[in-house]
Structures are given as C-alpha cells and as structure tokens.
Amino acid sequence: MSKLTIVAHIKAKSDKIDLVKAELLKLIDITRAENGCLQYDLHQDNENPAHFLFYENWESRQLWQTHMSNQHLKDCMGAIQGAVEEFTLNEMTHIA
C-alpha cells in the first residue's frame, strides 16, 4: 500500500488559542518517533492564529491508525475538548 497523507484542520475557540497550541505542540516529538511516521508538521495560519493544520505522512494507513489509538493523542483530545470550534481530517493519497 502507498503511503498515507493526513491533512487535519483544527480551529480553536478565540479564547483558547494558546491552550490548543500548547497541547498540539506536545504531540510533535512523541509522534515523530512513532513507527511509520514519515512527516508530522504543525502549522498555524498567519492571518487567523486560531487555525492550525497538521500535515502528516505515514508509511501506511494501519500505522497511522495505531498512532490514532495511542494514549498521548487521547490525552491531547481530552485536554482540548471544548476548546476547539471545528476539526476536519482528510486522508489523502499522493498521486503525482
């Protein structure tokens, strides 16, 4: 199977930007060390600081799903519960 690209958009509530950013930053090092993680980059919109984007590449969907069930991700989701206005996630396949 070809590698899997994940694009995740997280939009924090305006009064929770710092909290969401701090929790998302905690994911970086531990996730980059996970089996199958090829790229795990966090971005913040220059015009709208409440908008965060993860751009991820994984060796396979199965390894990404393992990541999604890890405790550090569950902890993050719990910490930002109620602080996020919108969350979208797209599973993408590189075609060219």
Image (cartoon, rainbow, N blue to C red):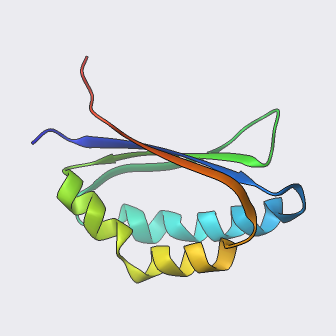
Compared with 84, 47 (above or below) is: above
Residue 34 appears in the rendering: no
| Corner quadrant of residue 15 | bottom right
The residue under the point 21% across, 41% down is 3
The residue under the point 26% across, 69% down is 66
- 37 relative position to 81: left or right: left
Q: Which of 61 and 31 is in front in this view?
A: 61
The residue under the point 73% across, 71% down is 82
Q: In which quarter of the image is the N terminus?
A: top left
The residue under the point 80% across, 45% down is 49
Instruction: Name the residue at the right extreme.
Output: 15
| Label total for image | 0
Q: In which quarter of the image is the C terminus?
A: top left
Instruction: Name the residue at the top extreme.
Output: 96
Instruction: Name the residue at the left extreme.
Output: 1
Looking at the picture, how far across and down is residue 10, in whole percent? Answer: 63, 51
- 75 relative position to 4: left or right: right
Q: Which of 67 and 86 is in front in this view?
A: 86
Looking at the picture, how far across and down is residue 54, in whole percent? Answer: 52, 48
Compared with 26, 39 (above or below) is: above
Residue 8 appears in the rendering: yes
